[in-house]
Amino acid sequence: MSAYLHAFGSHLPERVVTNAELAERTGKTAEWIESSSGIQQRRWAAPETGIAAMGVSAAESCLKTAGFPTNKIGMLIVASGSGARGFPGPAAAIADRLCLLSVPAIDLPMASAGSLFGLALAMRLTETYGDILVVASEKMSQIIETEPLDANTAILFGDGAGAALVSSRPGRWRMLDAVLHTDGQYREDLVFDGTGPLRMNGLTVILQAARKIPASIEEVLARQNLSAPQVTAFLLHQANLNLLTRVAKALNVGPEKIFANVQRYGNTSSASMLIAATEWAGTNPAKGPVVFSAFGAGFHWGALVADSAD
């Protein structure tokens, strides 16, 4: 049985945090922040706004776009790397607020790659559960907004949530294939243990991501007898603009094919890919293959390819 992507949705906090604001707090310049990351600004949620609340807003946005009733959802998958360490995770709270009574809700406590893994799992589970809502919600500001700010991490991250509706019913994109990978030997290179500061070996992360994202994309495309130039758009985890540029070069495609909104929102971890997909799908009617790919702590990474169904 085939699985289809029907719609996306997103939520972004109102507060805009500019490079100038962070420059004052990190001892760097706004120009240095942009040149090192490609990021010009990001969104940070209010202290009282939690991961579940943002996830619900993104879910409601997605379902409204799809014109699909909440009470028909058969499963909920929630990805969040910034959720509180402990249990239950945000999936139960989001399910409750959406009134998904007795509907199975699964947490994926994964940073950056969580939404990709969620989509890949949903693609395989629609035969049993029908319509599956995938949500990724991250409040990275609560992790990195400590005093003094770490200039290497505080400049990168933003808050937000994204959502996607995956179904066995025919929809806008037919999901063709996905590949997922993990290499635990690098797990200490990007770590947040719930108490201390986020620790990141930036050089290792960027080198591994720049290799593994293109490799996974080429892997999944080869399995479908497709090549990178045939892809209409690449909707990737928005880590930083420099990485997106390197991926385009590795795939030998023009940078215009790599959708980018990291300049405005920063790195929203697992939410970023679905936020990017929401913006792309809302403004781009182009048909043809679309590739999703992400890389994150663990290291976890992979790619998924879908094609327009009409």
Image (tube, rainbow, N blue to C red):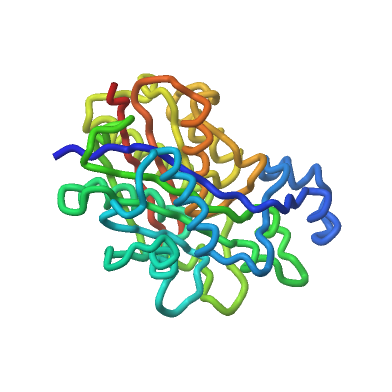
Residue at 53% over, 35% down: 279
- What x and y, as percent, mark residue 25? 82, 61
Where 249 sits versus 18, above or below? above
Where 235 sits versus 47, above or below? above
Q: The C terminus appears in which quarter of the rendering?
A: top left
- What x and y, as percent, mark residue 124? 21, 48
Q: Can residue 274 be seen in this view?
A: no
Q: Is residue 247 left or right of residue 106?
A: right
Q: Is residue 121 visible?
A: yes
In the rendered image, the residue lying farthest to the left is 1
Residue at 54% over, 58% down: 54
Q: The N terminus appears in which quarter of the rendering?
A: top left
- What x and y, as percent, mark residue 83? 50, 69
Front one among 245 and 263: 263
- What x and y, as percent, mark residue 185? 38, 64
Residue at 33% over, 30% down: 172
